[in-house]
Amino acid sequence: MGYSKIFSGTVASAILCMSFGIAHAEGMRVSSTSFKDNGVMPSLYADNTGGCGGSGVSPQVAWSNLPAGTRSVAVLMADPDGSKGLGVSHWVAYNIDSSLGQLKQGEAQNDGAGVTIGKNTAGKNAYHGMCPPVGDQPHHYVLSVIASDLAPTVLPKGLTRDELLAALKGHALGGLSVVGTYGR
């Protein structure tokens, strides 16, 4: 079975689970005013270098109804279609106090008050906008929020996506994603 079939099934399952979770008021919620779930992401969020057609602005993401005991959240954005199916990590943000309830559009692009930004695939501690190859099918961008029982300042700076996920093992209390697409 090809990667795209596995990913398509995974995305469909995730979207079905998210739809079910949204129908129940007591469950965790994740949303974005920047794009509709499973909709096209505006070019504003694409990279502003290399002819990617964007402004390099990070999207808004909000969370609510977090699991009991949540102290901090992590926000991740990844393109599982990128790098010829190996995936691209665009945004690794963590040490975020769960009571914030959201990261506003353009917020948390770099380290700042109340947010630690980890390394993206390019090795930079910054939000890295979308930039799929010209002519590819639109790529999927998974914007995830992970609730954890860790204090908002406990994790070190500069973690990669994989390092952050390893650090959250045993501390993650729940997670949910919204998915957008973008192509050039």
Image (cartoon, rainbow, N blue to C red):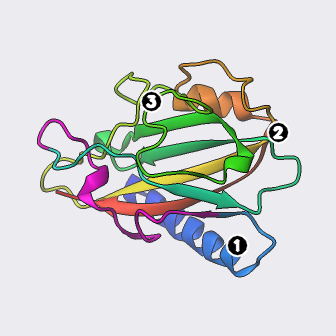
Circle 1 is placed at which residue position? 21
Q: Is residue 111 above or below residue 146?
A: above
Disc 1 residue type?
Answer: Gly
In front here: 90 or 64? 64
In the rendered structure, which disc, 3 or 2, sits on the residue that comes first in sequence? 3
Q: Residues within 10 Å of mark 1 (few under 14, many from 20)?
A: some
Whole-percent x, y for residue 179 in the image: 46, 62
Residue 149 image label: 2
Task: Inspect the magenta stretch and tell me whether residue 10 lies in it.
Answer: no
Quarter occupied by residue 56:
top left
Q: Residue at x 88, y 53 (%)?
A: 68
Residue 93 % position (x, y): 55, 36
Distance CA(mark 1)–CA(mark 2):
21 Å
Quarter placement of the C terminus? bottom left
The crowd level at tag 3 (other Cα within 10 Å; few <14, some 14-19, many 20+) is some
Q: Amino acid at mark 3?
A: Asn
The amino acid on which the numbered mark 2 sits, given as a three-letter code, is Asp
Report the magenta stretch's main SS.
loop
Q: Is residue 148 visible?
A: yes
Does the stretch in magenta take in 45?
A: yes
The residue closer to the viewer here, 180 or 65, is 65
Dot 2: element: loop
Residue 54: image location, x then y, percent? 21, 49
Q: Closer to the N terminus: mark 3 or mark 1?
A: 1
Q: Residue at x 65, y 58 (%)?
A: 63
Q: Which residue is mark 3?
A: 110
